[in-house]
Amino acid sequence: MAISLNQFAPNEPVAGLYVYQANLPQLHNNIISANQATALTYGAVVTLDSTVSNTDAPVIKQAAVTDNIFGVITFNPKKASFVAGERVAIARANDIVWMPAAGAIAAGAVLYFNSSNKVTSTATPGNSIIGKAITSAAAEGDFVQVELGFATTGE
């Protein structure tokens, strides 16, 4: 997908792209952890890396499905992946972003995420809740609007 410098957002859903109010305040100063072995892309669900100390900015890494969620890396029209040491913007609780579905999802469903950063309404004991579906998805790969709201199931 080619993006011109004058285009602020694509016309189709992209993982991590804000659904409404593209100018919402967001944390732009998150640093990808040196412990993150693989590059992260927009739409990645992240957690704080508690093994790294940094007083200037949050240090983040890919979240495991049972981790406390810190946010979702937001769409960046200039760059698709981010490596250790780079800074990224993230969406936080109560923001609404597009996320790819892992299967059919009904609007209003509580959502979890899998290791591919896709959302699912299928509860798995111990998995963290990422939010609520605002729209529905018919099949895997469809994009759904997700109102972010992070919680742990405690199961």
Image (tube, rainbow, N blue to C red):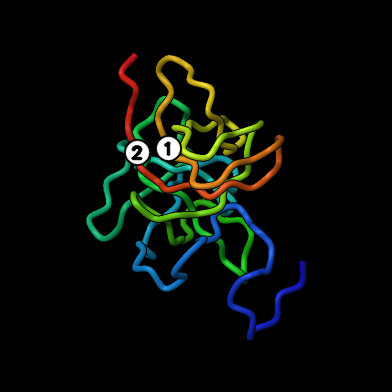
Q: Which residue is mark 1?
A: 130
Percent of width and height locating residue 74: 50, 58
Binning the other alpha carbons within 10 Å of mark 1 as few (below 14), some (14 to 19) or many (20 upward) gives: many
Total marks shown come to 2
| Mark 2, secondary structure of its residue | strand
Q: Which residue is mark 2?
A: 150
| Mark 1, secondary structure of its residue | strand
Q: Residue furthest bottom?
A: 6
Residue contact between numbered discs 1 and 2, judged by CB atoms under 8 Å: yes
What amino acid type should be assigned to the residue bearing mark 1?
A: Ile
Q: Residue at x 35, y 44 (%)?
A: 70
Q: Quadrant of residue 117?
A: top right
Task: From this view, report whether residue 111 is shown above or below residue 14.
Answer: above
Q: Residue at x 53, y 50 (%)?
A: 145
Q: Residue at x 56, y 35 (%)?
A: 106
Compared across the picture, whether 92 is left or right of 35 comes to: left
Compared across the picture, whether 147 is left or right of 51 comes to: right
Front residue (pair 70, 145): 145
Percent of width and height locating residue 57: 30, 58
Q: Quadrant of residue 142?
A: top right
